[in-house]
Each structure stands twice: as C-alpha cells, then as structure tokens.
C-alpha cells in the first residue's frame, strides 16, 4: 500500500502530465502544450518512476517509447479517468433539468452566430441553467471531451483524430461546404472550380494543424493535384477574409456557413470547389451525457429552435 507521500505523487495533475506525454511522445511538445517547463515535466515523470520502481519510457535516438511498466500505468490511468467520469455523469444524471451548468466547447473556426442566438433563447426558457461556452482548438476539444471538462463539443466531422467512437455519440447540425474566395470573374460564372484551377493564385489558409487545412491537404492528395502556394496562415476566418480582400490576387477558402452569415463583408466572389469538400458541423458528446436531464433538455430545445427556423435561414437573418 502506498504511503501518503507516494499517493501525492499520483495526483490528477501528475497523471494528466503522464497521459499527455504518452500522446505526444515528446517532452518539449508536451511541456509547451501544458504551459510548463520541460524540466518540470521531466521531474514529475521521474517522481512517478521512483514510486513505481521502474522506468516508464525508453529512448531510441531522439524518440521515446513506453516501457511495459509505462503501458501498464497508462492503462490504469485511463481506467481511473473513466471511473471518475462515470461517477461524475451518475451524479449529474440525478440532478435537475432546470438547474446546474452545461459546459460547451465550440471549435474556434466554426461560425458561432446561430449557437449564440440559441443560447440567448435557451436562457429565457431555463434561466437557472448556466451555459459555459468555450472557444477551443480541435485538440483542446477532444481532450476536454475525453477528460470530462466539457459536456458537449461542437466540431466538424469526420475527424481522423478521433480513434474510437465506442463511448461517444454525435448529432449533426449542418453539412458545411468549403467555398473558394477569389477575384476571378470567369470563375464566378461557373457552378464550381476544379482543384487545379483554384491553385492558379497563391492562397491564404488556416494554420497547418487546423481541421480545414488538413481536410484540404487530404482531398488534394487524393485527387493527385498539387497544393496551392501558401503565403499566409491565420487562425480566424475573419483574418483570412481581411487578408485576402486587402491583398492582390490571393485566394482563400472559407466554410459556406461563414459566407452566408457575413455576406455583407464580402467584396470577392464565392464559388464551390469540385469535387465538393463538405463536413458535418455536429454536437459530439459521451453517450452517458444524454442521460443527464439538463443536457437532454438542451438538445431537445435545440431541435425545437431549428423547427421554428432552419439553420440556414437563421444564418441569413443574422446579416
């Protein structure tokens, strides 16, 4: 049995550090992501190793790998996290549908206007339910769902970063097409623009790790077409539109939902790509979340909200 000092080594923070290191397999990258120094991360791992009496990682060149002990501890860590998540869900399931907090993670690049409008209306119906809306990156969203820090994620699917759907469910919100934003009058008269023609001019794009950047790379690769020359990268659709409109002969791509909601901002043409590139904006959540009364009520009210006026019509009305 572990003494008190050893038990403190296995704090939730220490195990979270260990878990994140197993995902990245890089001390430098993990420390940056956690917002700590590399020596602090190394020290935390060494403390755990001293308690378990075995190394958790071994290195080959510059790469690190899990030892057998590390694999065993990782399995136990995930079992513990799952147990805590399940207990939390059970406690929440016993709570009222008319009170408490619903924590939502929204992909930072997704158009948010309809979600924001719904939260306003939902608050009128359920004033005692607090809504926490967090703008998160794709990785932050998935980590937050796994670790039960948010109840609902709003993100694009499919997403190859999601390895297993065993305990998760999704609820589609809308299919969102990618639009080429350009100043080519000939393109504007077409129903669509092929991948190759779209690369005639340099592009401004989302950051490399962002969902749409990876999706575009995948579709271009599958079509055996060279990717466009990229001259700037941004994290926000507003930044992309501003840069493209204020530059000479630069193209970009943006979700149709953003184009509809902010039509008055556009000075450039919008044309779909061919073959079409489409993703489903969806709610994603652990399947047990549906049993929590206030979350069940929230999703039901969302359906009622869209029954009164469609998602697209609400985007148009926000102009």
Image (tube, rainbow, N blue to C red):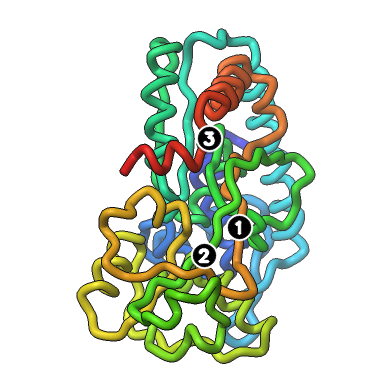
In the picture of the structure, the residue carrying the numbered disc 2 is: 178
The residue under the point 70% across, 28% down is 288
Asked whether disc 1 touches disc 2, contact meaning CB atoms under 8 Å apart, the reply is: yes
Q: Earlier in the sequence, mark 1 or mark 2?
A: 2
**Distance of label 2 from label 3 (alpha carbons):** 20 Å
How far across and down, in percent of the image, does residue 9 sit? 53, 44
The residue positioned 41% from the left and 69% from the top of the image is 206
> SS at mark 1?
strand
* Foreground residue among 56 and 206: 206
Separation (CA) of disc 3 from disc 1:
18 Å
In the rendering, which numbered label is found on residue 279? Answer: 1
Specify which label sits upstream in the sequence, 2 or 3.
Answer: 2
CA gap, disc 1 and disc 2: 8 Å
Please tell me which of labels 3 and 1 falls first in the chain: 1
Residue sitting nearer the eye, 231 or 96:
231
Residue 312 pos. (x, y %): 49, 42
Residue at image location 69% in from the left, 45% down from the top: 78
Quadrant where the N terminus is found in the figure: top right
Q: How many marks?
A: 3
Front residue of 277/291: it is 277
For the residues carrying marks 1 and 2, which lies nearer the camera in this image?
A: 2
Compared across the picture, whether 319 is left or right of 96 comes to left
Residue holding disc 3: 310
Q: Position of residue 234 (x, y in %)?
A: 34, 69
Picture quadrant where residue 302 is located: top right
Q: Outermost residue, left direction?
A: 246
The crowding category of the residue bearing disc 2, from other C-alpha atoms within 10 Å (few below 14, some 14 to 19, many at least 20), is many
Q: Is residue 65 above or below residue 75?
A: below
- Nearer to us: label 3 or label 1: 3
Mark 2 or mark 3, which is nearer to you?
3
Asked whether residue 27 appears in the rendered view, the answer is no
Q: Is residue 24 left or right of residue 257?
A: right
């Amino acid at each position: 049995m572990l003494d008190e000092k050893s038990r403190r080594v296995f704090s939730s923070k220490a195990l979270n550090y260990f878990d994140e290191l197993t995902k990245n397999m890089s001390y430098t990258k993990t420390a940056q992501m956690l917002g700590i120094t590399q020596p602090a991360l190394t020290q935390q791992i060494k403390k755990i190793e001293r308690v378990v009496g075995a190394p958790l990682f071994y290195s080959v060149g510059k790469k690190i790998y899990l030892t057998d002990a590390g694999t065993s501890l990782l399995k136990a860590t995930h079992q513990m996290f799952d147990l805590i998540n399940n207990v939390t869900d059970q406690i929440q399931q016993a709570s009222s549908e008319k009170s408490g907090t619903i924590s939502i993670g929204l992909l930072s690049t997704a158009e948010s206007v309809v979600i924001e409008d719904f939260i306003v209306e939902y608050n009128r119906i359920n004033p005692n339910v607090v809504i926490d809306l967090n703008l998160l990156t794709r990785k932050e969203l998935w980590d937050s769902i796994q670790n039960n820090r948010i109840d609902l994620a709003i993100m694009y699917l499919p997403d190859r970063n999601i390895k297993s759907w065993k305990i998760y469910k999704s609820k589609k919100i809308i299919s969102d097409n990618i639009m080429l934003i350009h100043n080519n009058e000939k393109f504007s008269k077409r129903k669509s623009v092929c991948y190759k023609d779209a690369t005639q001019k340099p592009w401004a794009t989302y950051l490399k790790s962002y969902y749409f950047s990876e999706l575009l790379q995948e579709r271009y690769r599958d079509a055996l077409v060279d990717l466009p020359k990229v001259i700037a990268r941004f994290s926000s659709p507003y930044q992309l539109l501003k840069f493209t409109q204020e530059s000479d002969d630069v193209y970009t791509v943006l979700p149709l939902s953003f184009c509809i909601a902010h039509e008055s901002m556009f000075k450039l043409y919008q044309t779909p790509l061919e073959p079409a590139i489409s993703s489903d904006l969806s709610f994603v959540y652990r399947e047990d979340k549906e049993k929590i009364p206030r979350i069940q009520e929230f999703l039901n009210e969302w359906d009622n909200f869209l029954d009164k006026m469609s998602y697209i019509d609400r985007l148009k009305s926000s102009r």
